[in-house]
Amino acid sequence: MGMTATVEQLQHERASREQARAEASFARDKRQSWRLGLFTSGRVFLGLTFAGSAGSMLADFGGTVASLQETLFDVHRLLPFALVFQLAAGLCVAAGFYARLAAASLAAYLLASLLVVPPDLSLDLGRAIALANLGLIGALAMLASHGAGRLSADHARERRRKRRLNAARRR
């Protein structure tokens, strides 16, 4: 009888440990999915910020040209390329397609635009624009260094590449 109680206690303790491990694993998975969702939504919103900005400038192309007329040398030639680049790179960041390259390119583009068309820092709005651009450059730098994450075209492409390599090695 004493031995039976011991076996039952051991079985109960083992079941308790397994349940605790399962609960801990569930909590860890829940935290990871929460982080993955935040990272992915941040990347998508960051990319759509650039794509939306390019889209609004394309929609009012005449107004954009007029506002930049005094700042750039040949705005009629340069602006279409800049807008197409901003739109394409923004969509690449949002989709996670060559996201590191697109993020680094957009950061360089923003830095160049701050130097070529500097905001008037004597005005509150100019300071806010400069700080917002610096914040976007920081977000893009983080994306360029960490990559697009698991929910991205880059991750899917990398998984396919690894599967092909593994299949080729098995042959």
Image (cartoon, helix red, strand yellow):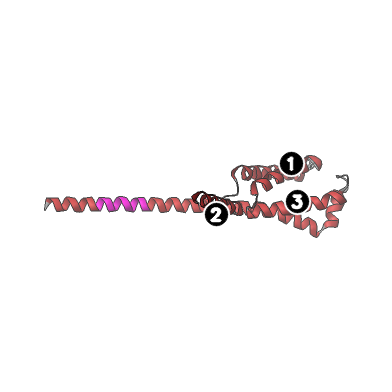
Q: Nearer the viewer, mark 2 or mark 3?
A: 3
Q: Which amino acid does label 2 sit on?
A: Gly
Q: In this view of the protein, which residue sits in the foreground, 131 or 88?
A: 88
Q: What element carries label 1?
A: helix
Q: In this view, does 30 lie to the left or right of 120?
A: left
Q: Please state which amino acid type lies under the numbered disc 3.
A: Phe
Q: How far across and how far down the image is residue 21, in percent?
A: 35, 50
Task: Determine if the magenta segment contains residue 17.
Answer: yes
Q: Which of the marked residues, 2 or 3, is nearer the chain's N terminus?
A: 2
Place residue 88 in its image quadrant.
bottom right
Query: What secondary structure is marked by label 2?
Result: helix
For label 2, the residue is 37
The label number, if any, that marks residue 76 in the structure image: none
Q: Using the image, determine if residue 34 lies above or below residue 114.
A: below
Count residues near mark 1 (Cα–Cα under 10 Å), then give few for <14, some for 14-19, many for 20+: some
| 131 relative position to 13: left or right | right
Category of crowding for the residue at label 3, using alpha-carbon neighbours closer than 10 angstroms: few (below 14), some (14–19), many (at least 20): some
**Could you give the CA–CA distance between mark 2 and mark 1, rounded to whole angstroms?**
29 Å
Q: How far apart are marks 1 and 3 (CA)?
A: 15 Å
What residue is disc 1 on?
Answer: 111
Residue name at image x 72 percent, y 44 percent: 128
View extreme (bottom): residue:
59
Counting residues from the start of the chain, the first of labels 2 and 1 encountered is 2
What residue did someone put label 3 on?
85
Locate residue 107: give its quadrant: top right
* Magenta-tinted stretch: 12-22
The picture places residue 161, in percent across and down from the top left corner, at: 57, 51
Magenta run includes residue 129? no
